[in-house]
Image (cartoon, grey):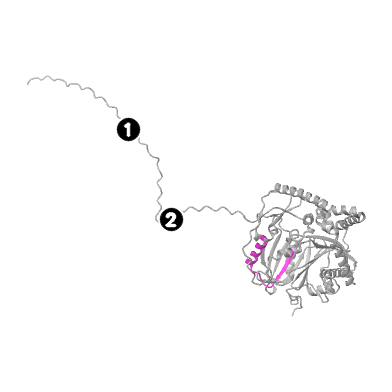
Amino acid sequence: MTDETMTPPAKKAPAKKTPAKKVPAKKTPAEKTPAKKTPANRTPAKKAPAKPAPKKPTGPVLQPQRLSGWDFATWRGAAGDPSLRSPIIGLILLDGTPDWDRLVERFDRASRLAPVLRQKVVTGPVDTMTPRLMVDPDFDLSFHLRRFRISLPGNWDQVLDEVRRQSMTDFDLQRPLWRVTVLEGLEGNRSALMIKLNHTIADGQGAMLLGATVVDFVPEGVDLGPMPEAPVAADIDQMGLVAHAMKEASGRMARSAREAVEAALPVLGKLLSSPAEAVDDVATLVRSIARFVSVPSSPLSPSMTGRSINYHFVTYDLPLAELKAAGKSRGLSLNDAFMGAITGGLGRYHDERGEPVTSLRVNMPISLRKHGESASNAVTIARFEVPVSSDDLDGRMHTIHDTVVSWRNEPALGLADALAEMSRLVPSEVLAAAARTSDFTASNVPGVPVPVWVAGAQVLRMYPMVSTIGAAVNVTLLSYAGLASVGLSTDDAAVLDRELFARCMGEGFAEVVGRPILPADPLGSSALALDGSDPV
């Protein structure tokens, strides 16, 4: 065996490593959340439609309306003494229940046609700044309308009790000063409509103008057309109100100065042509103003001296034709006959109590309303003495007639509102004390001469129910379709025997019309017919 030489294998050179090519990293896209699959049996939710922007009011924009001088004096007096609050309630007796929806629609329409029903009284930072009537931006008609059913038996005394409670309840001063209540369930399936207003926003005639927008002259009513636009409140804050008042005051001062110059020109001319006559005219006006602003120290009645915030109501019905005839037969008016009856009743009451009196002091509203004016106040108050002797009806009526005519012709009558403006300089306590010196207030308001309906129900009676407003007694007459209906209020602290007083007043009316007159119960069988005739 041949030994073979083992040659080791040649060493291989190590292979060169080729550097690995870097592959650029792929950008990973952002991960998307997979959309959820909507189950086959479910409908995808729809987006809620955007709410439409609230419509801007498009009605007439009303700027603040300044209270008249007389209204301001009334408002300020009531703020200082609650016995001077002056609510007026129109008490309307209906032969059935009015249709509620129709009634609401009518008062909605009335509040648009008579903006005062949507205005509230806004006062300034001081009580001597005249308040303004401004459209209530939060006006809510439903707050002003209500209805309820009275408990059995539903008689007239219950109605008067409810009227009394509502009259002595103050208004919410943050809202317009009126309220309507329907009282259902009265005897004979009748109902009563009570329309309450504050005297600051309407006088007696103004209340009738407002009521005219609610009544119909036929049972089924008529189509009044589209609903009018509601008035819109002016965008004004308290500072703006003060600025508005200051601007208005400067304008009023300029107008007053111009009017004073214009009024003085005739006097200056007369001074040149007839000095003595001009001086007499000025002196007459000064004396007239003095009569208007004079303040007595106390009532004339020896017994009706107390005053309070409580009062009661009584109603009477008289045949209107007989009351007119009583005046006409003496060459006098309906108002003279009315005043003759009131003073006769007051004289009897004092005689019955053993405290006879020859004259008493009366407050009598004198209308300054011109044709076509709005329903707001347009009156002034004359205060004067009248005879109340119960033994001379003719003489009493003629004396009262002459006195009333004299006051209607007073030169200062045209300055009544300007004189009332001066009341801001008098403490409210003094105003209240002056109001309490009157023994009674008497007012005669002409009403609707023909039958009317409210929301399908016929009106049977309309009674004016007015608070005493500082006097011992308030007597107000409202005529309607052949009847003269009287609302009488007596202060509880002044008239201590209400039954005697009611009887004496009935006797006063009976003396004038020539038939017995008792307190009215229009739900009873003895009630006068709508035309004033005796019941069948």
Toward which corner of the image does residue 393 lie, by quadrant?
A: bottom right
Please provide the residue range marked out in magenta.
88-112
Furthest toward the front, the residue is: 273
- Label 1, label 2: how many angstroms apart (C-alpha)? 48 Å
Q: Label 2: how many residues lie within 10 Å, few (<14), some (14-19) or many (20+)? A: few
Q: Amino acid at mark 2?
A: Thr
297 or 380: nearer the viewer: 380
Tell me: 155 left or right of 289.
Answer: left
Task: Residue 492 in the image: state x and y as whole percent.
Answer: 81, 64
240 or 163: nearer the viewer: 240
Toward which corner of the image does residue 212 lie, by quadrant?
A: bottom right
> Circle 2 — which element?
loop
Q: Which mark is residue 43?
A: 2
**Which quadrant is the N terminus positioned in?**
top left
> Circle 1 — which element?
loop
**Which quadrant is the C terminus positioned in?**
bottom right
Task: Residue 526 in the image: state x and y as whole percent.
Answer: 76, 77
Q: Which mark is residue 408?
A: none
Magenta-colored stretch includes residue 510: no
Q: Is residue 493 visible?
A: no
Q: Label 1: how many residues lie within 10 Å, few (<14), some (14-19) or many (20+)? A: few
The residue drawn where x is 55% and y is 53% is 52
Between discs 1 and 2, the one toward the N terminus: 1
86 or 4: nearer the viewer: 86
Furthest toward the bottom, the residue is: 536
Task: Residue 421 in the image: state x and y as whole percent.
Answer: 80, 53
Task: Residue 10 in the image: state x and y as whole percent.
Answer: 18, 21
Furthest toward the left, the residue is: 1
Tell me: 96 left or right of 42.
Answer: right
Magenta-colored stretch includes residue 101: yes
Q: Amino acid at mark 1?
A: Val
Identify residue for label 1: 23
